[in-house]
Image (cartoon, coloured by chain):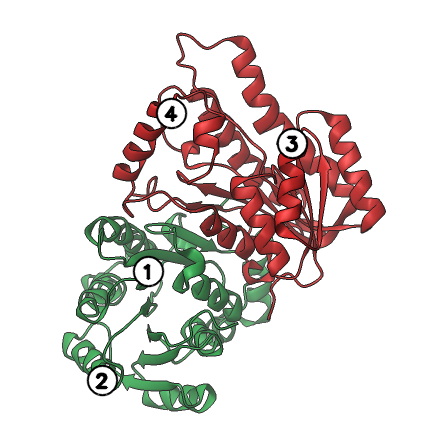
Chain colours: A red, B green
Amino acid sequence: MKKLEDKVAVITGGSSGIGLATAKRFVEEGAHVVITGRREKELEAAATFIGGNITAVVGDVSRLEDLDRLYATVQEKYGHIDILFANAGAGTIAPLAAATEAHFDQTFDVNVKGLFFTVQKALPLFKDGGSIVLNSSVSNVLGLPGFSAYAASKAAVRNFARAWTLELKDRGIRVNAMSPGPIETPALETTTGLTPEQAEQAAAQFASQIPMGRRGKPEEIAAAVTFLASDESSYVTGVDLAVDGGMAQV
Amino acid sequence: MTRLNGKTAVITGGATGIGLAAAKRFIEEGAFVFIFGRRQDALDAALAELGLNARAVKGSVSDEADLDRLYAAVKAERGSLDIIFANAGGGSQLKLGEITAAHIDETFNINVKGTIFTVQKALPLMGEGGSIVLTGSSAGTTGAPGFSAYSASKAAVRNLARTWAEELKGTGIRVNVLSPGPTATELATAALGEEGQKAYGSMTALQRMGDPAEIGAAAAFLASSDSSFMTASELAVDGGLAQL
């Protein structure tokens, strides 16, 4: 039995890593998926890789007009949304003493403001009884030297799930946060500003801090998101589901 | 759905309520399930529902000899064990000022000591890919007037998973806590009555009590490889009760 038969799902940050793996899993579970991302070439490649039941809309979650275009496409094509995985996010390294205003704004624009409006603008299309999953991070409860803006932005995301659970309860829409630990995605090497050596060191250090002794795979996060997106989690709302190999749990 | 094809599972407190719902679900997903409980009539009724891929062993988790018999039965028929759902638990109401030593002992013997030996005695049968699920409670993170012993015992259960995740490092065995909130088990619905169920359910964001099958679905997620990067975690299945 497929868990998301004929559901309409939107995934932001769908070009690579966790977003791509989740889009693939959702389609395997029977969903129609709309992915969005900033990089056209990568986004198109992702859609091609997944094959069927996938629509790609290029856009940046920190630009409200891009979100409007995304949801206009969803409305035109499907008329409603059942599932939203607000996954787009990023963080670059900047120690407190050296961080610039641009660094702070960029982090919060994508991770907090972008996610806020990703959800707000989806609401008119949302079917009652749907499921919203917010991608937070284990750093929402951990200190992460050099990434304080990122970690704080992810704590904000976790807390959105609390208020929105209450605001949307009368519509039967569940809202949960999901907090991955270190995952084997391209992001660590390509978007954080770390050198390849630093990225490799960070990966090894992460593995040593994780009770499971390794980083997670995007597919493992996708499986957990599928649980939260589906009726399998029908009595789960307002939680922060840690999928972190135990990193922030012990 | 056959996520648990060929797996062998033990479910304590498996004759009724959440344990029975999980047993049904595990079997639907392809598992062979041993249920363990104290009452023979309840075990017999459960077996009649569960069918050919279930076995029942009568006993109490607070009795080590009973647990030894349980795992001897598992070993004899299946040779090894993939999943433990350490779900047996209980609690009665006594306010601070009325608490007796017997009340504390009874609560902690089942919920804490019982959970510890349920898992410890299972380990020799478990290996790579194994999953241990402990039943916590939303009471483990909230105050619950009259239930101080129960709440404290469930906080202890949540914390056992932390230490065990570290101790099981390298074995490929994961351990997580499933914390139900108000759940409409036979026991709870009988005790609460209709009004009580409504009142209890309305404390949650979802405005209702959970169905045992909803807890069973979450248990199946934690038991299966869909949660393969989760250990030491707590999954609250509580309608939002303790999350906001």
Q: CA distance from mark 2 to mark 1?
A: 37 Å
Q: Nearer the viewer, residue B185 or B226?
A: B226
Secondary structure beneath label 4: helix
Three-letter amino acid code of the residue under disc 2: Ala
Q: CA distance from mark 3 to mark 4?
A: 32 Å
Residue at the spot of label 4: A196
Q: In the picture shown, does residue B205 fall above or below A16? A: below
Q: Chain of mark 4?
A: A
The image shows residue B39 at horizontal and vertical percentages of: 32, 85
In whole angstroms, how far apart are the C-alphas of marks 3 and 1?
45 Å
Q: Residue at x 58, y 35 (%)?
A: A160
Q: Amino acid at mark 1?
A: Leu
CB atoms of marks 2 and 4 within 8 Å:
no
Q: Which residue is mark 3?
A: A116
| Image location (x, y in percent) of residue A89 | 55, 31
> Which residue is labeled 2 in the image?
B73
Residue A228 in picture, x, y percent from top left: 55, 53
Residue at 78% from the left image edge and 50% from the top image edge: A80
- Residue B225 position in % (x across, y down): 41, 61
Sequence-first disc among 2 and 1: 2
Residue B94, numbered label = 1
Q: CA distance from mark 1 to mark 4?
A: 60 Å
